[in-house]
Amino acid sequence: MNLNKLTIKQAHELLEKREVSSVELIRAHFNEIKKRDKDIHAFLSLTEEEAIKAAKKVDERISRGEPIEMLAGIPAAIKDNILIRGAKTTAASKILENYVAPYDATVIKKLKEENAVFVGKTNMDEFAMGSSTENSAFGPTKNPVDLERVPGGSSGGSAAAIKAGFSVYALGSDTGGSIRQPAGFCGVVGFKPTYGAVSRHGLIAMASSLDQIGPIARNVDDAAAVFEAIRGVDELDSTSVSSSAGGQDYWNSPLDMEEIKVGVPREYFIHGLNPEIEKNIKSVISKLEKEGVGIEEIFLPYSEWALATYYIIMTAEVSANLARFDGIKYGFSQIKNQKSKIKNLMEVYLESRGEGFGAEVRRRIMLGTYILSAGYYEAYYARAQKVRRLIKQDFDRAFKEVDVIITPTSPTTAFKFGEKTQDPLSMYLADIYTISVNLAGLPGVSIPVKEAAGLPVGLQLIGRNFDDVRLLKIAKIIETISQ
Amino acid sequence: MALTKKEVEKIAKLARLGLEESEKEKFAEDLSSVLGYVQKLSEVNIEKVEPMTGGTNLENVMREDNETKDIADDEMKADILTAAPDKENGYFKVPSILE
């Protein structure tokens, strides 16, 4: 039996029937990591000792005949911008190279209550800024499907870990597509919940009005199981909402195909989209139509301005959020470096931040600083907030007619290393289909469909605000018919 | 929209980022290219549009102001201070602020 390709449900049943112990399951994953992660580099750090300890605890409960939670004893990989108390948390940045988290993120607290087992922290673009993991200060992750290609990003390590069989599921974070795009590139499922459905407490903030934590998994059922475990209101995140919003009963009451209405936005199927990706997505749409699902062409006319809006709002929030890395409270600092001859506080800031942050992070901080500076605020930031409203209204209008929207996750399949690193704009275009979802706060999920030239293709499904469960149910239907 | 090297230096200083001399040209080029792209927004008619200021339209939320309950127990306080590069008697230490 291959223990490295199990779904959560399969692993849970094996544990319950005592066919496999949690320790065996965890060891099988560490063995695979040790064998192959030298080539893939999905992980920045491993927590083997703690993992075995947690697994033993679950095994003891099983041997006493106690019932166990759905995620108990099952390996999870955590993106390295999510805090696990006592574990190194770097956000793939030199400025946090030696940072040990002093508390648990709320999602980690919730997973611990389920007795989940953490195998390690996954690689990412520095502070989640990027679409390929090439911006990691500790070297890129490779796509397990083709080692010459990027796994996508910024949650590239999490997506690669699931594809490679290093973990059963993973957590990622998504600000402009950072869960969905790497899931698409690696051929796994990635789900970004509605903004507010999952607490962001303990997630290293990038752009607070856009960031959201979500699962990367082998199938839609697994993504739903993890979502159920981590969702809910949290005192420590004032934007979080109770889990009754978002819908219940994923596992019961399946949907009637003939009651589903799917929208296909004309603006997302235009030039720049790889023709084979277009063909594969359209073939899923035809299959749905044959099953009785209603298909409607819809219009999202402000899509054209989404990327520009995103790059103003995101960089503005980045420049504010990353002000906390100051060389004083924690992280990399030049404060005590004898050679740097620090004379005052200003020099601590300049030297610690200048050296601690990579090029893309500094680029975005500077853009945000410029955009928010006196004389430019109205022209850039205030205008972008208004266009953001118009983009949201596009979706509000569409969702009066349809339940979900189908698009490609990305315009291309996984690209080669170095292909887009020289020109930041070409890299930003990799997120063209995913960013609007964050601007509007909507839930979105990427599901693997038929490959193009041997590389995975992701289909993105977008749902109404707080309609996460129905979105996942429809995703499950698509997963079933496209297999 | 082309930023000069001098403007990049000014922005970097506002952002508290030290830059190497050799990087400034490339940053000027990159920032100019992105700023050029986002100019696109000037095409949109935004008259009478309300700004969207957050992720969702949520109400103000209050909680008890009790940091010891959820945020920092004593052990955590010690851990937080351990992470600081320079400290003294339970405080973060900062070099002189005024000239």
Image (spheres, helix red, strand yellow):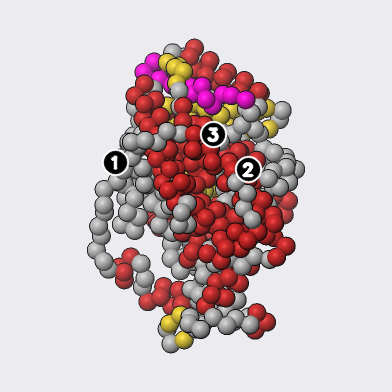
User: Along the polypeptide, which appears first: circle 3 or circle 2?
Assistant: 2
Mark 1 is surrounded, within 10 Å at the Cα level, by few (under 14), some (14 to 19) or many (20 or more) other residues, namely few
Q: Point out residue B95 in the picture as x, y percentages from the top left corner.
A: 51, 82
**Which mark, by number, is residue A63?**
none
Residue extending furthest right?
A148
Residue type at numbered disc 2? Leu
Name the residue beneath numbered marker 2: A425
Residue type at numbered disc 3? Tyr
**Alpha-carbon distance for marks 3 and 2?**
15 Å
- Asked if badge 1 and badge 2 are on a common chain, one would say yes
Please name the residue shown 36% across and 46% down the image: B53
Find out whether the residues at labels 1 and 3 contact each other: C-beta distance under 8 Å: no
Q: Is residue A29 above or below residue A400?
A: below
In this view of the protein, which residue sits in the foreground, A397 or A31?
Answer: A397
Please name the residue shown 63% across and 45% down the image: B33
Name the residue beneath numbered marker 3: A433
Give the residues in magenta: A258-271
**Alpha-carbon distance for marks 1 and 3?**
29 Å
- Image mark 3: chain: A
In this view of the protein, which residue sits in the foreground, A208 or A261?
Answer: A208
User: Along the polypeptide, which appears first: circle 1 or circle 2?
Assistant: 1
**Which mark, by number, is residue A244?**
1
Residue extending furthest bottom?
B89
- Image mark 2: chain: A
Q: Is residue A94 visible?
A: no
Q: Is residue A305 visible?
A: yes
Q: Secondary structure at mark 1?
A: loop
Q: Point out residue A193 in the picture as x, y percentages from the top left corner.
A: 42, 41
